[in-house]
Amino acid sequence: MSPADSFPLYHPADARRAFSSDDVTRRFAKVAQLEPGARVLVLGCGADGAAALLLAREMGCSVVAADMDEALVSSFRERVRNLGLTDRIDVRGVALDSLGLPDGAFDAILVQGRVLYTLRGTLSALRPLLARRGRLGMTFPARVGRFLPKAAAELWERRLGAPLLLPRELLQSLELGGFEPESAESLHDVELDDYYREVEASLRPTSGPQASPLREELALHRESNGKASVSYAFLIGRRKEPGEKPPASRDRG
């Protein structure tokens, strides 16, 4: 197996992110049972910080909005200041290999439309930051078609350092990583087409070598003729403690 490309996987800073709509953020907040005062980490918040703003304004959450790009952090920090939300949103620059955040500090962690770590790396890095019963919402590539072309399988294994998984297999990985899997959704073909169209429009000649795997991803998607074999999934899991009993059967059987 070839080593994975360096993480995070490249995404143009000004391109729309998958699962970044207000509706997705609200659904996550509902599943996570967020109430006023809940502590939320929005990791990879981006320049607009839309999720952080919604969680602070609508839900009354106390939000840490973090990103790795200092220019984005500076821009969003200024926006938060202008909106008078500095008492609810703490904007921070972080390094992925050392987030510098305390264990058990958050009731929820949200990573929308960015693949920041390997799957195992995401779970191991973020689980300790969650309080008991805290929720993680994360984005990761998923195999969705019945047939996976060889070129797509090879590209994604090279990028991720592991074979692509089906959404149900991603949920199984959540469980193995110390979470109670709660939901998974993936972009359907029309949504994926729209997403890739906007991403491609945001690519520039100056994007450099870091964008090469993304350009290859776009080319393979165009070859799929509107029927994708690979998409992006949004997963939600609740932090589970060692020895915790499984949830009661929903069918009462």
Image (cartoon, rainbow, N blue to C red):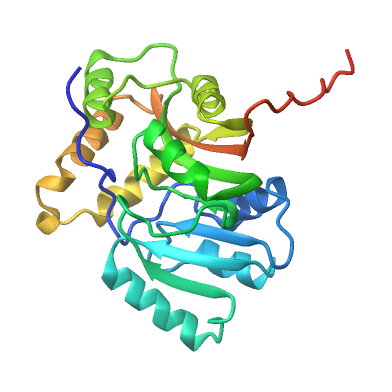
- Residue at position x 44%, y 47% in the image: 18
Tell me: residue 4, above or below residue 97. above
How far across and down, in percent of the image, does residue 160 sit? 29, 30
State which quadrant residue 217 falls in: top left
How far across and down, in percent of the image, does residue 90 sit? 49, 73
- Residue at position x 35%, y 45% in the image: 116
Tell me: residue 56, above or below residue 129. below
How far across and down, in percent of the image, does residue 177 sit? 50, 29
Tell me: residue 52, above or below residue 32. below
Quadrant assignment for the N terminus? top left
- Residue at position x 52%, y 58% in the image: 41
Tell me: residue 206, above or below residue 48. above
Answer left or right for 159 relative to 147. left
- Residue at position x 54%, y 55% in the image: 21
How far across and down, in percent of the image, does residue 172 sit? 54, 21
Answer left or right for 177 relative to 157. right
Quadrant assignment for the C terminus? top right
State which quadrant residue 77 falls in: bottom left
Answer left or right for 60 relative to 154. right
